Amino acid sequence: MEEVLRVTREHAFDYPIIWAENFDSLADHMADLHLACTKICVVTDSHVEKLYAESLLAALPKNIQTDLFVFPAGEENKNLDTVNELYYFLIEKRYSRKDILVALGGGVTGDLTGYAAATYLRGIDFIQVPTTLLAQVDSSVGGKTGVDFRQFKNMIGAFHQPRMVYMNMAVLSTLDDTLFSCGMGEVLKTGLIQNAALYRWLDKQRNDILSRQTEALTYMIRECCKVKSGVVERDPKEKGERAILNLGHTIGHAVEKLMDFSMPHGHCVGVGTVAAAWLSVQRGLLSQKDLAWIKEMNTVYGLPNQVDGLSAEKVLEATKSDKKVAGGRVRFILLDAVGHAVIDDTVTDDELLAAIHYISRRKNYE
Ligand SMILES: NC(=O)c1ccc[n+]([C@@H]2O[C@H](COP(=O)([O-])OP(=O)(O)OC[C@H]3O[C@@H](n4cnc5c(N)ncnc54)[C@H](O)[C@@H]3O)[C@@H](O)[C@H]2O)c1
Ligand SMILES: [Zn+2]
């Protein structure tokens, strides 16, 4: 049983997100796009290549030249060196503006391929085939593409929407528990910012989700994509509302940076969300009961509520280098209910520091 959701903004973009149980219908859906391409380059990392490259290549339209570009897996390869290699590969194989890239993999592959597609010959089409939960609920939808530059995360990039997002739900079976919980960090965030019903459902259906029942996962991912695509349709370039997707990310990113990226992004977001929820309680926006619920849900889905051994001052300092700083102040996302986020430009350093203290585990503290 397939399901489709369209992401549209008049005169700007219009693309389908497809949920399927295998890759079988990919060629048919590509035919619906009426592409003029004569070549398709699949870009993937060295892990995903072993798992899914063969079945994906077999599912591409026949009578079109297909190529496979593989780069070593890992965030450390999401950089301009890998993009250079890909450009050269495309030039050597004479890819033209009509041709197309397919990103097969997690957020690293999607971001890197999208950026190459945005810039090669001033922009060519690409299709997202996300294979991690995080990529399915977050990075594959919305058109943010990019790479890291030296120690700066996502510092170079472009907005470039895909022509299609094709999700084969079967690929989630090979994710380990940590990768799965990372995606759940973004799922919980999505419920918290704009979908209280999803959040309650995640509470009730925990057994189905943790046992990765396909039907439950499809529903969950579709609800997340609905929220994300709605936000992106209204504010594609983050001039306003799109900032709410950053709930938990200001402190989360700072923690991630100070831990030298040893703590996975989704886990940092989980902790950052607790800090934001605590601050929302201090502001009188959210109840203690909701804060306790948010922490319980983190625990259910394998996300931490606290971190060890970080200096709160250093975390605060690191929040300043976050890209979401508006006029010297951090643009912070608070909750005034489970299911409703608010953008706030008035959070002070003292408030941030107190929130960081709240998520710091005392015993190793400073
Ligand atoms: N563009 C956006 O809007 C956006 C949003 C959120 C995150 N991101 C980016 O996404 C990246 C993180 O994404 P990620 O967690 O998917 O990282 P990732 O792409 O590195 O994938 C994590 C690991 O899982 C492996 N993997 C992928 N699919 C698998 C599968 N089905 N089974 C087993 N292993 C599999 C990969 O090879 C990799 O080793 C970061 O670079 C982040 O900046 C982008
Ligand atoms: Zn995130």
Image (cartoon, helix red, strand yellow):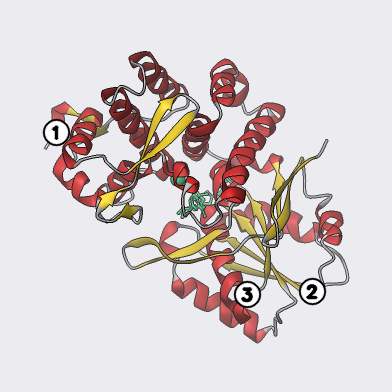
Q: Callout 3: 10 Å neighbours few (<14), some, many (20+)?
A: some
Q: Under tag 3, what secondary structure?
A: loop
Q: Residue at x 62, y 81 (%)?
A: 121
Q: Relative to residue 160, is residue 21 depicted above or below?
A: above
Amino acid type at image mark 1: Tyr
Q: Quadrant of the C terminus?
A: top left
In 3D space, how far apart are the residues under numbered discs 2 and 1 (Cα atoms)? 57 Å
Q: Under tag 2, what secondary structure?
A: loop
Q: Under tag 1, what secondary structure?
A: loop
Q: Callout 2: 10 Å neighbours few (<14), some, many (20+)?
A: some
Among the 4 quarters of the image, the one containing residue 164: bottom right
Q: Residue at x 70, y 52 (%)?
A: 8
Q: Residue at x 41, y 39 (%)?
A: 247
Task: Look at mark 1 in the image and give the residue it sits on.
Answer: 365
Q: Quadrant of the N terminus?
A: top right
Amino acid type at image mark 3: Gly
In 3D space, how far apart are the residues under numbered discs 1 and 3 (Cα atoms)? 48 Å
Residue 86's disc number: none
Task: Look at mark 3 in the image and give the residue it sits on.
Answer: 123
Q: Position of residue 65 (x, y in %)?
A: 79, 74
Q: Position of residue 160 (x, y in %)?
A: 59, 64
For the residue pair 285 and 81, the one nearer the viewer reads as 285
Amino acid type at image mark 2: Cys
Say if disc 2 is inside 8 Å of ligand 1.
no
Q: Relative to residue 10, is residue 71 depicted above or below?
A: below
Q: Position of residue 264 (x, y in %)?
A: 39, 44
Residue 37's disc number: 2
* Image side of residue 193 versus residue 61, left or right: left
In 3D space, how far apart are the residues under numbered discs 2 and 3 (Cα atoms)? 14 Å
Q: Is residue 177 visible?
A: no
Q: Are marks 2 and 1 in contact (CB under 8 Å)?
A: no
